[in-house]
């Protein structure tokens, strides 16, 4: 049946497929599946190779195969020991018979009857001195099978949605694959010997054989990289069309600023600052990524750049992912620029402060929104720290010259365009700061010549954070240790994960932990609490109390994840550590080890499966964020890793590190195509795919 015959289109909602009621549709949407096209792109994550069909007599323990035979008997019974429902069947063919056993699938006796001609697929094993198939796949004999007698796809599933269901649904949707537009120019496709898209989609779900699967994967992976490359390169090209303000290097002032720091810069900090200052001297907008482990000291590098910008008459925006961080950066810059002709502003949804040039007032002054916007427009503010609030339409800069984005993956390409629009017809220079480095191999292929500066050295007197896994039995000792540290003046973070997904702000987890710590564990200590639902005002006072050591223990959600700087805190306890990715754990650990004092990170895991322990053990051994990024790559693949870096990369569904060769080809081909047709005017399908992606990704 052709798609057109049933009127099925890729855009059709899944509710229109047969056997999809509203309950099933709701469950499917939990997997992100709403349309036929979503389903077609719901790729298997592995395949069971049940393609070998053997006579029953040829089975041996360990054999993975499909057999075909007649059901002699099929019935349910209760298992004697456990309260399990067992379904047993005997299947015969000309060469012998075999017992099949299923657990908790009593409905099978209604679907299959004695006398039915069936396929059974699975691994044969000896149980109770008899050859059996335990929980085999079963289906009626027919030409076109879904669950047996082939490479059988295994899909990401969810509660209430079985593999059998997904396979049957995908099969229903498959006729629409030929309607999914193929954006590759035919000449290119033929030159690279790539399959057509429709064929590739069909084969990736129900491959005829291994070789077909390989070809299908090659085509689909190529597409993922190709569209990404088109999007990246096109955005880069478009952004390079708008000139930026050139910023001359101010040697004396820069030296004076650097000498005012209570430390000497590391070699990497110097090199990064120097590179940035060189970029700023050009009228081509800078797009540079500054990678540096947590605590490596990226902020001072921004300060050096901002000083040069201010002295050239330009303005700098520093964008922080959270309000807490914005406040903290503001305080840092106020301190650094107290004796410099740099007016520093804070602009968040609820807080607006200004410290004047060559500040004389003891405290920054509080301002109204309209006042601060007017000052921005008149160029009276040289450096403004803010959150997303800085991206509102109403914000107009007199001469926005540098936009620094802390933890770059939180901002998208649209926000960049907003910043360009908010300026004075020029493009700002862009500097992205991140503590989650992109492994070099990946960066090269994905970004090509993206400018990257890395701060690998840690400031000299820093000590390594002692990191330990804490067993339930060791908890009391942990609490005593915290008490001892507090007694000598130190402070501790206790981080709670979101346990209940509906608890978006972590209120419940944190409140429960607070009650426990406050009442039972540390009735004598001052414990503060911080979570996403607190008012901005309350967050600020809570942070201020902790920063001033008026509270000793801060119970918090991951709002402290990025960048919070409390040098006197030497302990971080991470509850439910298994719920966090390695890079995220690393971010959290970076909250301590920020002073000369020895610091500690304690991981408390609720789950202790071998996988969890292996992952956490790797974390204990990894040296720095660069090593952890490589590990995340190993444990989770590039799509996952990049997904945590930048949301849009999660569209790399199939691509893995082993595919960098395909990525390389895609990169060259994308460049060649854009060279001929920069706007993709002749390639409507690609243009649409690129636009969809650009809406998601932050592109360098
Ligand atoms: P991050 O790279 O995580 O943003 P920060 O810029 O917040 O790190 O710096 C962390 C701390 O290290 C700050 O208190 C900062 O003053 C301090 N710091 C930065 N550079 C140096 C250095 N070269 N030597 C000593 N301390 C430094
Ligand atoms: Mg930082």
Image (spheres, rainbow, N blue to C red):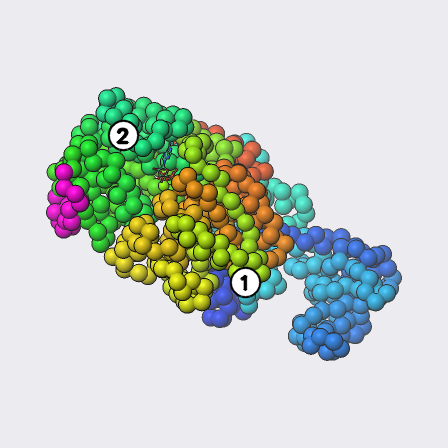
Q: Where residue 510 sits in the image (x, y, percent)?
A: 40, 62
Which residue is depicted at the point 22% across and 45% down? 346
| Rendered-image quarter of ligand 2 | top left
Judge from the rendering whether residue 587 lies leftward or rightward of residue 198; answer left or right: left
Give the numbered dot on residue 260: 2
Q: Residue furthest front?
A: 488
Q: Could you say which quadrant of the image residue 240 lies in?
A: top left
Based on the displayed image, in which of its 4 quarters is residue 19 positioned?
A: bottom right
Nearer the observer, 124 or 171 = 124
Q: Is residue 544 above or below residue 344?
A: below
Q: Nearer the viewer, residue 564 or 131?
A: 564
Quadrant the N terminus occupies = bottom right
Query: Of helix, strand and loop, which one carries label 2?
Result: helix
Residue indicated by mark 1: 158
Is the shortest distance between ligand 2 and the CB of mark 1 under 8 Å? no
User: What is the tally of numbered marks visible in this picture?
Assistant: 2
Give, as a single range, the part of the protein colored magenta: 360-374
Left-right relation of 625 to 682: right
How far, Cα to Cα, is label 2 from label 1? 57 Å
């Amino acid at each position: 049946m052709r798609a057109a015959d049933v009127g099925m289109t890729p855009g059709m909602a899944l509710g229109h497929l047969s056997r999809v009621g509203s309950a099933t549709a709701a469950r499917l949407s939990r997997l992100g599946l709403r349309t036929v096209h979503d389903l077609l792109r719901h790729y298997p994550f592995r395949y069971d190779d049940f393609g070998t069909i053997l006579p029953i007599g040829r089975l041996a323990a360990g054999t993975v195969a499909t057999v075909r035979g007649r059901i002699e008997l099929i019935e349910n019974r209760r298992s004697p020991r456990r309260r399990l429902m067992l379904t047993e069947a005997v299947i015969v063919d000309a060469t012998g018979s075999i017992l099949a056993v299923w657990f908790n699938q009593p409905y099978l006796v209604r679907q299959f009857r004695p006398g039915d001609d069936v396929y059974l697929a699975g691994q044969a094993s000896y149980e109770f001195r008899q050859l059996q198939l335990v929980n085999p796949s079963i289906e009626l004999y027919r030409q076109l099978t879904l669950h047996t007698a082939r490479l059988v796809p295994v899909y990401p599933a969810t509660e209430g949605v079985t593999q059998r269901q997904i396979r049957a649904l995908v099969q229903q949707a498959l006729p629409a694959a030929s309607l999914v537009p193929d954006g590759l120019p035919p000449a290119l496709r033929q030159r690279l010997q790539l399959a057509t898209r429709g064929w590739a989609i069909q084969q990736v779900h129900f491959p005829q054989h291994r070789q077909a699967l390989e070809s299908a994967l090659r085509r689909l992976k190529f597409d993922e990289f190709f569209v990404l490359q088109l999007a990246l390169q096109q955005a880069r090209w478009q952004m390079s069309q708008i000139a930026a303000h050139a910023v001359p290097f101010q040697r004396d002032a820069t030296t004076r600023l650097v000498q005012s720091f209570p430390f000497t810069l590391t070699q990497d900090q110097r090199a990064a600052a120097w590179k940035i200052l060189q970029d700023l001297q050009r009228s081509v907008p800078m797009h540079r990524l500054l990678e540096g482990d947590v605590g490596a000291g990226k902020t001072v590098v921004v300060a050096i750049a901002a000083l040069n910008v201010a002295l050239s008459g330009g303005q700098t925006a520093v964008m922080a992912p959270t309000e807490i961080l914005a406040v903290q950066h503001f305080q840092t810059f106020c301190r650094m620029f107290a004796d410099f002709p740099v007016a520093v502003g804070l602009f968040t949804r609820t807080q607006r402060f200004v410290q004047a040039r060559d500040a004389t007032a003891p405290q920054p002054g509080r301002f109204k929104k309209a006042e601060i916007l007017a000052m921005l427009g008149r160029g009276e503010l040289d450096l403004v720290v803010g959150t997303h609030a800085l991206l509102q339409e109403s914000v107009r800069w007199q001469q926005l010259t540098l936009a620094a984005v802390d933890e770059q993956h939180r901002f998208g390409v649209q926000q960049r365009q907003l910043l360009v629009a908010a300026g004075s017809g020029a493009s700002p220079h862009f500097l992205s700061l991140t503590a989650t480095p992109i492994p070099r191999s990946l960066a090269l292929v994905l970004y090509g010549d993206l400018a990257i500066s890395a701060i690998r050295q840690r400031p000299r007197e820093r000590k390594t954070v002692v990191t330990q896994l804490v067993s339930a039995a060791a908890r009391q000792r942990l609490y005593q240790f915290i008490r001892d540290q507090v007694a000598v003046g130190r402070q501790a973070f206790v981080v709670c994960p979101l346990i209940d997904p509906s608890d978006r702000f972590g209120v419940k987890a944190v409140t429960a932990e607070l009650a426990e710590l406050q009442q039972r564990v540390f009735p004598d200590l001052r414990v503060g609490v911080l979570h996403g639902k607190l008012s901005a005002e309350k967050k600020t006072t809570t942070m201020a109390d902790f920063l001033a050591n008026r509270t000793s223990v801060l119970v918090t959600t991951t709002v402290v994840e990025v960048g919070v700087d409390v040098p006197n805190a030497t302990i971080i306890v991470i509850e439910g550590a298994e719920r966090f990715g390695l890079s995220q754990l690393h971010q959290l650990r970076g909250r301590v080890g920020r002073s000369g004092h020895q610091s500690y990170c304690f991981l408390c895991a609720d789950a202790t499966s071998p996988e969890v322990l292996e992952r956490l053990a790797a974390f204990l051994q990894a040296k720095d964020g660069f090593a952890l990024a490589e590990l995340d790559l190993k444990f989770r693949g590039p799509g996952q890793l990049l997904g945590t870096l930048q949301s849009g990369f999660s569209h790399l569904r199939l691509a893995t590190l082993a595919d960098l060769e395909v990525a390389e080809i895609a990169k060259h081909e994308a460049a060649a195509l854009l060279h001929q047709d920069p706007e993709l005017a002749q390639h409507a399908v690609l243009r649409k795919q690129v636009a969809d992606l650009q809406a998601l990704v932050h592109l360098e």
